[in-house]
Amino acid sequence: MDPINEIELEDCPVCRGAGYIEDEQGWCMYACCLNCGTETAHVSYKTPEERLEAARQAAYLWNIGKVIHNGMCD
């Protein structure tokens, strides 16, 4: 099991939807809302060892509400 799945995310700070940590094709991690599309900045990594730390940083940004929202929400 991927340890990234163990990282706890708060509900979306915009719509209260479920958050998810996304790995963008092996170069960065970010947290996003499955409902409204709100997301954090992309946190880059270069090695497999840095991957988990990048996910933790993205989760931290999400959990403190430092997100980007495009203004559209259901």
Image (cartoon, helix red, strand yellow):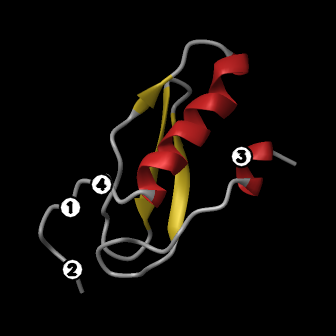
Q: Amino acid at mark 3?
A: Ile
- Whole-angstrom CA distance, mark 4 to mark 3, is 19 Å
Closer-to-camera residue (38/26): 38
Closer-to-camera residue (38/56): 56
Locate residue 21, reporting x and y percent: 55, 52
Determine the secondary structure under disc 1.
loop
Can you say whether 21 is above or below 72 in the image?
Answer: above
- The reply to whether dot 2 and dot 1 touch (C-beta < 8 Å) is yes
Farthest residue toward the left? 71
Disc on the earlier residue, 2 or 4: 4
Position of the C terminus, as image quadrant, is bottom left
- Whole-angstrom CA distance, mark 3 to mark 2, is 27 Å
Q: Amino acid at mark 4?
A: Val
Q: Amino acid at mark 2?
A: Cys
Q: Quadrant of residue 34?
A: bottom left
- Whole-angstrom CA distance, mark 2 to mark 4, is 14 Å
Disc on the earlier residue, 4 or 3: 3
Residue located at (64% from left, 20% from top): 50
Locate residue 14, reporting x and y percent: 29, 74
Disc on the earlier residue, 3 or 2: 3
- The reply to whether dot 1 and dot 4 touch (C-beta < 8 Å) is yes
Residue bearing the label numbered 2? 73
Farthest residue toward the bottom? 74
Closer-to-camera residue (62/39): 62
- Whole-angstrom CA distance, mark 1 to mark 3, is 23 Å
Q: For label 2, count other residues whose C-alpha is less than 10 Å away and answer few (under 14), some (14-19) or many (20+).
A: few
Q: Amino acid at mark 1?
A: His
Q: For label 4, count other residues whose C-alpha is less than 10 Å away and answer few (under 14), some (14-19) or many (20+).
A: some
Residue bearing the label numbered 4? 67
Residue bearing the label numbered 1? 69
- The reply to whether dot 3 and dot 2 touch (C-beta < 8 Å) is no
Residue located at (34% from left, 54% from top): 39
